Amino acid sequence: MGSRFLALSRWVLIVALLVGLSGETCNAKDDGTNCTFSCGNIHNISYPFRLKHDPEHCGNARYTLSCENNITLLDLPPSGKYHVQAINYLYRTIRLVDPGLKKNNCSSMPQNFPPPLRLPYSAYDMSVYPLSTPVFYIKCSNPVNSSLYVDTAPCLNINASSLVQQKTYSYVKVGDMKVGDLNEGCSAEWVALALFDYNTSSYESIHSALMYGFDAFWLDDEEICKHKWRKYHTCYPHTIPGT
Ligand SMILES: *[C@@H]1O[C@H](CO)[C@@H](O)[C@H](O)[C@H]1NC(C)=O
Ligand SMILES: *[C@@H]1O[C@H](CO)[C@@H](O)[C@H](O)[C@H]1NC(C)=O
Ligand SMILES: *[C@@H]1O[C@H](CO)[C@@H](O)[C@H](O)[C@H]1NC(C)=O
Ligand SMILES: *[C@@H]1O[C@H](CO)[C@@H](O)[C@H](O)[C@H]1NC(C)=O
Ligand SMILES: *[C@@H]1O[C@H](CO)[C@@H](O)[C@H](O)[C@H]1NC(C)=O
Ligand SMILES: *[C@@H]1O[C@H](CO)[C@@H](O)[C@H](O)[C@H]1NC(C)=O
Ligand SMILES: *[C@@H]1O[C@H](CO)[C@@H](O)[C@H](O)[C@H]1NC(C)=O
């Protein structure tokens, strides 16, 4: 279990989002006709994004969002669907929240696993942007007093389901998992992502950070075409709308 999570946490450092590598063309025009720009609290859905039932020309098929019950969703298999909280077209980041998390209920847990960790590359400098940080959920057979671990009680009280089993203690650790970070009798059970400008001294504040969401980056077509991915795509000269 431990080594699996170690490998996983390394991937977390690079959260690159690339939905599909199938042979779609690299040019798309958006004349804005018949396209939906708004769903729930997202009012600015535009290229490269499009909503599922909108015409193809509204965006790039690789960046298809859906609108369900007034909530904008991004499906990232095999992880699952995420609630879209914000789209930043300048930094090309999309802020996502796990749908298992509920506001003002720190007993609610992230439900998607593994986190959406895609290809280990980026065409641009990630260090410019805040990196999403992993949050590891850890279960221990004995109480642990460690500066690295934050107790999840009383939010998460994962008591043994039968009296025969031992009581377990639940913690989270924010940040990468290094060798030795996992105490004896402890196992990593889950990992989620968050952006941390946040006070991580209590599980409530960590839950708030998870509730705020994490950023995924997307590469635009120009970058994909410029780099080795070109061979998987048919790339055409970029057309600038209005010219
Ligand atoms: C927009 O919708 C109208 C009516 O449904 C249709 O006639 C028109 O061709 C559509 N335009 C585009 C660009 O799809
Ligand atoms: C959808 O969400 C928007 C923004 O939160 C709100 O103004 C609108 O009333 C909602 N519509 C429905 C049908 O719930
Ligand atoms: C929406 O996104 C487009 C494309 O980046 C941008 O030009 C426009 O200013 C944005 N509008 C709002 C209201 O953010
Ligand atoms: C809080 O979340 C937990 C776990 O999902 C759920 O069992 C509980 O009913 C929720 N409490 C409220 C008040 O919604
Ligand atoms: C945890 O350890 C610190 C220092 O190592 C100590 O001051 C503190 O009392 C300990 N807390 C518990 C609950 O054992
Ligand atoms: C878990 O166990 C503690 C002490 O054994 C108990 O006080 C608490 O109510 C239990 N919590 C749940 C959710 O069963
Ligand atoms: C974080 O929160 C704790 C308790 O809520 C507080 O004692 C501490 O000063 C806060 N730290 C920062 C850096 O805000």
Image: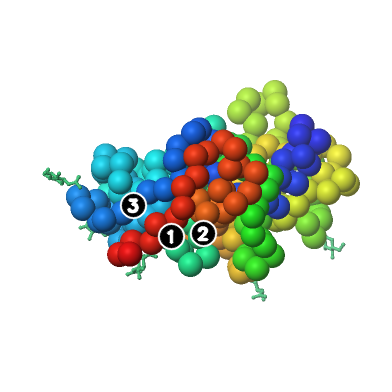
Query: On the image, numbered disc 3 is attached to which residue?
Result: 29
Does the closest atom of ligand 3 sit within 8 Å of the Cβ of label 2?
A: no
Q: Where is residue 38 shown, x and y percent of the image?
A: 27, 56
Mark 1: secondary structure: strand
Q: Amino acid at mark 1?
A: Ile
Identity of the residue drawn at 63% across and 49% down: 227
Kindly indicate the quadrant of the structure image that contains residue 51: top left
The circle on residue 206 is none
Identity of the residue drawn at 70% across and 23% down: 164
Which of the two discs, 1 and 2, labels the residue nearer the N terminus? Answer: 1
Residue 215 appears in the picture as rendered: yes
Contact (Cβ within 8 Å) of mark 3 with mark 2: no
The circle on residue 93 is 2
Mark 3: secondary structure: loop
User: Does 196 sit above or below residue 217?
Assistant: below
Q: Give the label, 3 or 1, closer to the camera.
A: 3
Q: Closest to the observer: 84 or 124?
A: 124
Query: On the image, numbered disc 1 is attached to which residue?
Result: 87
Identity of the residue drawn at 31% across and 41% down: 56
Q: Where is residue 5 shown, x and y percent of the image?
A: 74, 39
Residue 172 appears in the picture as rendered: no
Q: Where is residue 41 shown, x and y percent of the image?
A: 32, 59
Q: Is residue 152 shown left or right of residue 148?
A: left
Q: Is residue 149 shown left or right of residue 221?
A: right
Mark 2: secondary structure: strand
Q: Is the residue marked by circle 1 packed among few (<14), some (14-19), or many (20+) residues within 10 Å?
A: many
**In which quadrant of this rendering is ligand 7 seen?**
bottom right
Cα distance in 3D space between marks 1 and 2: 6 Å
Q: Amino acid at mark 3?
A: Lys
Q: Amino acid at mark 2?
A: Thr
Does the closest atom of ligand 1 sit within 8 Å of the Cβ of label 3?
A: no
Which of the two discs, 3 and 1, labels the residue nearer the N terminus? Answer: 3
